[in-house]
Image: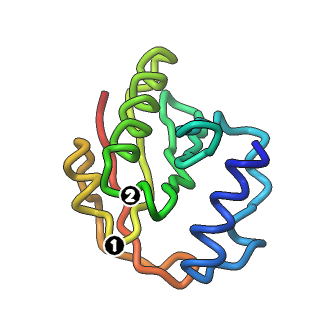
Amino acid sequence: MAAAFDLRRQVFVQEQGISAELEFDGLDDEATHVVAVHGDEVVGTARVRFLAGSQAKLERMAVSRPFRRRGIGRELVSFLIAESKMRQVKHVILHAQHDVVPFYGSCGFEGVGTPFWEAGIKHLKMQVQL
């Protein structure tokens, strides 16, 4: 977990300028976390929270800069979707940063509503039905 948190700190706090207080929101204990590992280095991470009503929310996905555009994010999403299906989840949502909306679209998510600002970054709510 420490390595996953370090990666989130690197990507969200250092690269994107999000405050550590917003990034580490106190919800990590109620989430399922996954990591992608290369050798002994954590190069990708994400969490999913299983919500009421057969719904899950994918959050905090980050991939180390040198490992981006290699399919790691797609594998993390695929794994979390499979995990959600095993838990009888019917609906997965996420808040996608505007720049990665096409990526999540290629993973089967569809945009919902209008863009909004979160942590000073433009986002779009996206969803997929399972």
Q: Which residue is mark 1?
A: 98
Find residue 8 and report its image quarter: bottom right
Q: Along the horizontal axis of the image, is 82 left or right of 87? A: left
Residue at left 56%, top 46%? Answer: 45
Residue at left 40%, top 71%? Answer: 123
User: Which residue is situated farthest in the front direction here?
Assistant: 39
Indicate the position of residue 4 as horizontal and vertical percent values. 68, 48
Indicate the position of residue 83 as horizontal and vertical percent values. 48, 23
Q: Along the horizontal axis of the image, is 126 left or right of 22? A: left
For this rendering, which residue is in front, 106 or 41? Answer: 41
Marks 1/2: CA distance?
17 Å
Q: Along the horizontal axis of the image, is 87 left or right of 108? A: right
Mark 1 neighbour class, 10 Å CA radius: few under 14, some 14 to 19, many 20 or more: some
Indicate the position of residue 29 as horizontal and vertical percent values. 79, 41
Display colour scheme: rainbow
Residue at left 31%, top 27%? Answer: 130
Q: Is residue 51 visible in the rendered structure shown here?
A: no
Compared to residue 48, the image places residue 124 above or below, namely: below
Mark 2 neighbour class, 10 Å CA radius: few under 14, some 14 to 19, many 20 or more: few
Q: Along the horizontal axis of the image, is 96 left or right of 24? A: left
Dot 1 lies on which element?
A: helix
Residue 68's disc is 2
Callout 2 amino acid: Arg
Callout 1 amino acid: His
